[in-house]
Structures are given as C-alpha cells and as structure tokens.
C-alpha cells in the first residue's frame, strides 16, 4: 500500500513538474496562472488535469481546440511515479526518502529544460541540491551530504577552469599563425567555456545523493552515455554540435542510484 501511495505522489508531483518545465523558461508563474491550453489559452477544467488519465481519455488532444497535447505530459508524470516508487523501494516511505525523490524530480525537470531550451534554471538547481542534502536520516548524514556536495561543486569548478583554459589556449596558439605585423598586438580570442555553471550545480546534487565513489562513477558513466550522441553530431554545423549534458548527468545518477550496491561492490573489489 505504501508503494502505491508513493507512486501516486510521484504521478501527482509529475503533473506539476510539467507546469514547471513549460513555464519557468518562459518566465511565467508556476503557481498563480491557472492551467490553460497552450494553443487556444482556454482555462482547463479540473477533470482535464487528472494525471495520466486525462491525456488518455482526451486522446492526447485539447478538449476545446482539439490541438494535439505533447506526449511529454504523460511521460513526465509516469517517470515521476517510477522515481518515487524506486526511492520508496530502496528507503521506505518517509520524509528523507521524499526529499531524495524530489531531488530526482528536479533533475528530471532540469534535463527536459536543458534538452528543449539549452538552459539550466538556477532555481531548480538550488532546489535539487537542497532536497539532496536534506535526504539524510541523521545529522551526521546531513553533514556528509553537504560536504560531498561542496566537494563535487569544487571539483567541477576546477575541471571547468582547466578545460576552458586549455581550449582557449589552443585557439589562441592557432590564431598566432595568422598574426601579422599589423595585428600582432590585437587579441580577439574568445574565452571558451568547457561546461556551464549549471553542470557544476548538478554535480553538487550528484555528490550529495551518491557520495564520493558512486558520484565519480556516475560522472564517468554520464560521459560514456553522451559520447555516442557527440559522435553522431560531429559532422554537423558548429551551432548544432552543442550537446546538453544535464540529461546525461541525471540519467547516470538515477542508474547509479538504482544499482548502487552492485556498482559499489565492483569498485571495492577492483580499486
């Protein structure tokens, strides 16, 4: 019964998560603006907002203008329910488990926004970190979560600085070959950012949720997951080669969370 309630909570929060994903990038309120069709702007009735069921009953179309409703809505609701169920299976039905599940939901929202809009809202990132840190069963665990979050944020910051310096220096050295006596003192080399600040905050969430060893494994796994996508985009124009990395960090985090026992046993046995 508790698992069913946990999944139900997840589906309900997933319905609100759809609002967050849709409105935050547009700068709209997620609380005070009534639910409405994004095509005809007609306010929706309560029975049009029943998670999963309404989309199925309406056939994936608006009840008024019959415009297709994105399948994203039921998928996010279903994924949120699965996340709450998985966390409840691992930690039970309690407040710390709720906090951990909410952190994963924030990562889900960040992944969708990064994928669709190439942006990572600080508000959701901060919520993800706070929920991850407070997903502790004791004061020592709370302090350890906070420490791991800071360590991962600091580590990613240093990594960002080192990679950005290397990439910028490489472009600068290549530009020196085209210098002439007329422009040798004029440098227009742009600062190349290797990763965004949003990735650093997501890394802090990963550290708080997984700890040091599992967190490092998740970072490595995220790179492996992103590699095939990056290779597929290699021959496209530069503006189309940008790969949103938050979805891969979030996916690697949930995979590592689910199989943490097996992964940790492998790490302990081999390293």
Image (cartoon, grey):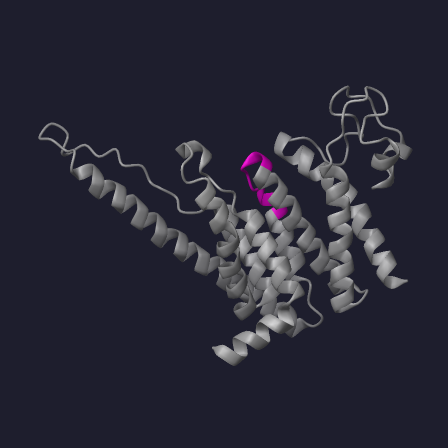
Q: Nearer the viewer, residue 121 or 64?
A: 64
Image location of residue 12, percent across then percent down: 82, 46
Location of residue 27 by image quarter: top right
Location of residue 112 by image quarter: top right
Q: Quadrant of the N terminus?
A: bottom right
Vertical arrangement, residue 219 with respect to residue 168, above or below: below
- Residue interval drawn in magenta: 116-124
Image location of residue 24, percent across then percent down: 65, 35
Image location of residue 263, percent across then percent down: 58, 71
What is the total number of numbered labels drawn onto the structure image? 0
Q: Is residue 200 magenta?
A: no
Which residue is pictured at 77% across the width and 19% down the height? Answer: 40
Q: Is residue 119 magenta?
A: yes
Vertical arrangement, residue 168 with respect to residue 47, above or below: below
Which residue is pictured at 63% across the width and 60% down the height? Answer: 255
Residue that protrudes farthest toward the bottom in the picture: 269
């Amino acid at each position: 019964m508790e698992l069913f309630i946990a999944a139900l909570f997840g589906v309900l929060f997933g319905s609100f998560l759809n609002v967050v994903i849709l409105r935050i990038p547009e700068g709209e309120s997620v609380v005070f603006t009534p639910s409405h069709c994004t095509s005809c702007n007609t306010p929706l009735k309560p029975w049009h907002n029943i998670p999963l069921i309404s989309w199925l009953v309406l056939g994936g179309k608006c009840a008024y203008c019959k415009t297709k409703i994105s399948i994203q809505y039921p998928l996010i609701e279903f994924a949120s329910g699965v996340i709450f169920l998985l966390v409840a299976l691992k930690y039970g039905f309690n407040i710390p488990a709720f906090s951990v599940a909410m952190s994963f939901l924030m990562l889900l929202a960040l992944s969708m926004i990064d994928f669709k809009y190439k942006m990572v809202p600080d508000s959701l990132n901060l919520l993800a970190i706070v929920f991850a840190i407070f997903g502790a069963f004791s004061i020592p665990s709370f302090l350890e979560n906070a420490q791991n979050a800071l360590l991962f944020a600091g580590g990613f910051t240093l990594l960002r600085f080192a990679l950005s310096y290397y990439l910028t220096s490489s472009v600068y050295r290549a530009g020196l070959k085209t210098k002439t006596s007329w422009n040798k003192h004029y440098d227009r080399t742009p600062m190349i950012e290797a990763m965004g600040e949003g990735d650093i905050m997501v890394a802090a969430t990963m550290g708080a949720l997984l700890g040091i060893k599992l967190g490092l494994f998740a970072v490595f796994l995220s790179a492996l997951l992103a590699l095939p996508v990056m290779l597929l985009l290699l021959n496209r124009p530069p503006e189309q080669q940008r790969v949103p990395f938050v979805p891969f960090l979030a996916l690697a985090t949930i995979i590592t969370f689910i199989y943490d026992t097996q992964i940790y046993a492998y790490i302990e046995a081999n390293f």
